[in-house]
Image (cartoon, rainbow, N blue to C red):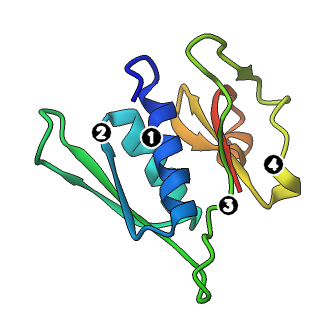
Amino acid sequence: MSQSDPIGDMLVAIRNASRAGKAQVDVKASKLGSAIVECIKDEGFVQNWRLVEEGTPQGTLRIYLKYTKDRKPILRHIRRVSKPGLRIYKGKGDLKKVLSGIGMAILTTPKGVLTDTQARLQGVGGEVICTIW
């Protein structure tokens, strides 16, 4: 695991566990990571998550993944957009829908971590963390 991009590591762990059919995945906890997972949960891509206080000093996020009845993952694609070496910012007028509204983007804005739909409604832009569908 890389130490320079913990959010990227979290997203890759979620994607890999989802593709492997795992029921849950554990990642290092952070405030930004918790906010991102909460957005993903609110949009229905994961069942739930909780903070587990064991193992590491900052704790662990335990994320419970969601599948269809025939065990296909709900979360099919998750991609890091803004990286430590290249930050991607979008203004409120530049936010496009992901896959014509099927997917979503997660942004960090002055009003907190929001989905692209919430950011458009509130009229704010920010750093595009990832896209999901």
Whole-Å distance between the Cαs marked 4 and 2?
27 Å
N-terminal of the pair, mark 4 or mark 2, is: 2
- State the SS at label 1: helix
Q: Nearer the viewer, residue 98 or 10?
A: 10
- N-terminal-most mark, 4 or 3: 3
The residue identified by callout 2 is 28
- The tag earlier along the polypeptide, 3 or 2, is 2
Q: Position of residue 44 (x, y in %)?
A: 57, 67
Instruction: Assign a secondary structure to mark 4.
Output: helix
Q: Residues at badges 4 and 2 in contact (C-beta under 8 Å)? A: no
Asked which quadrant contains residue 80, the reply is top right
Mark 4 lies on residue: 98
Hey, which quadrant is residue 84 in on the image?
top right
Q: Which residue is mark 1?
A: 10
**Hey, what amino acid is under mark 4?**
Val
Q: Nearer the viewer, mark 1 or mark 4?
A: 1
Mark 1 vs mark 3, CA separation in Å: 15 Å
Which residue is denoted by mark 3 in the rendering? Answer: 76
Q: Earlier in the sequence, mark 1 or mark 3?
A: 1
Q: CA distance from mark 1 to mark 4?
A: 21 Å
